[in-house]
Amino acid sequence: MRTYGEQVLRFGFLNLEVDGGPEEEPGVLPERWVRAHEEILAPRQFDWLGRAELTYSQTQPVPADATEEEKAAAELAQKAADRRFDATQELLGMRGFRSPTGQGRNPTGMFVREGTFEVISRHEQLAVWRTPPTNVVLRLRDAPPTPIVTVSWHNSYCSPNGREDEAYELSSLVDKVQAKYEDDPNRRWAAFLGAGDCNEYPVPAGERVPEIDWSSSEITDLVHRRHRARRQADGSWKSCTAVDELMLDCGMWDPARYAAHQLGQIEAIDATAGHASDGQGGGQRIDRIYMDPWTVRAVLEVNVIDTTGVSDHHGLEWVVSRRKYEEGLLRRCASLEPWAFTA
């Protein structure tokens, strides 16, 4: 792990495929979960970590008409989920938050290092989302009191319309991310920090990974094509990019793009998923990060973490200068201009 000559903050995101799998026997965590946490996540000492697919770390509500047998099974499942969630918090040394389960049944989560951040509030967004996001507002300790809206999400895998609706819900979380007003003693502005499995693609401008040719004979998973692309009037197919378009339209920045095009770290925009599935068009950058256009200037490095053999998604790590991050919180630097879609 690279060291720096200044104090830094480390952020991360990982969609760990179905939470590493079920317990092979009660109390014995699966090998992929152990490897993900002991070999990949814990050594990096993240200050903030977004997670997707906490499949076995959270359970579904028990129906009111459940039988006694079903209630007993649900109680055992909840104990196993709490056991795994507690193990995650202990191993990472971080406080965890879990979203409720949704129709997708693969909840999102978030882990926060309390020595770095103070938790101000948390919210549950149940409407619209197939898989509810985890949304926690933080404050950087010993720093300006600017609230930092943080969110970990997992967009719908099967619905372009659903992802677009979810993107608008994400836009509601960046609504307070505005410029500083000198006559505003209550500091009614915020920072934004979020990451998620978007289940669709970035706008193609400036990307390193080629767009998918949905008309290619190599595309054999036609259901996947229908989930991830829209048919055009001429019969061709165009990849869905609604989530990225909306976040960029709202002035948010992807730190990986910043690292690639401002810092020369072109590998920051490598593919994160899709490489493990046949007939779907190959690897694509569907796991992405977004920050407000002030604090993104603090980014020092963005890494795609190879998780081959552990998950079907690679992880993301981005490192920021704490000093510059604080400057961004106070709006003591100029905001970056919105991303040029035709760059």
Image: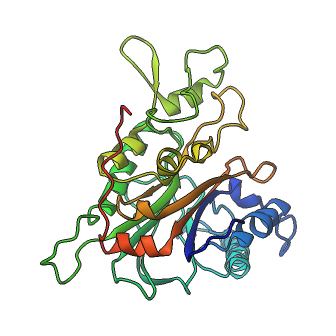
Spot occupied by residue 233 in the image (x, y as percentages of width and height):
36, 14
Q: Nearer the viewer, residue 97 or 205?
A: 205
Residue 249 occupies which quadrant of the picture? Answer: top left
The residue at the far left in this view is 183
Residue at (55% x, 43% y) in the render? 286
User: Which residue is found at the position 62% from the left and 70% from the top?
Assistant: 4
Observer able to see residue 176: yes
Rendered-image quadrant of the N terminus: bottom right
The answer to whether one can see residue 99 in this image is no
Please identify the quarter of the rendering in which residue 121 is found: bottom left
Residue 99, x across and y down, in percent: 52, 68
- Where is the C terminus found, in terms of image quarters? top left
Q: Position of residue 299 (x, y in %)?
A: 49, 61
The residue sitting at 35% across, 77% down in the picture is: 147
- Which residue, as the protein is rendered here, is positioned at the far front? 5
Left or right side of 17 for 262: left
The residue closer to the viewer here, 340 or 135, is 340
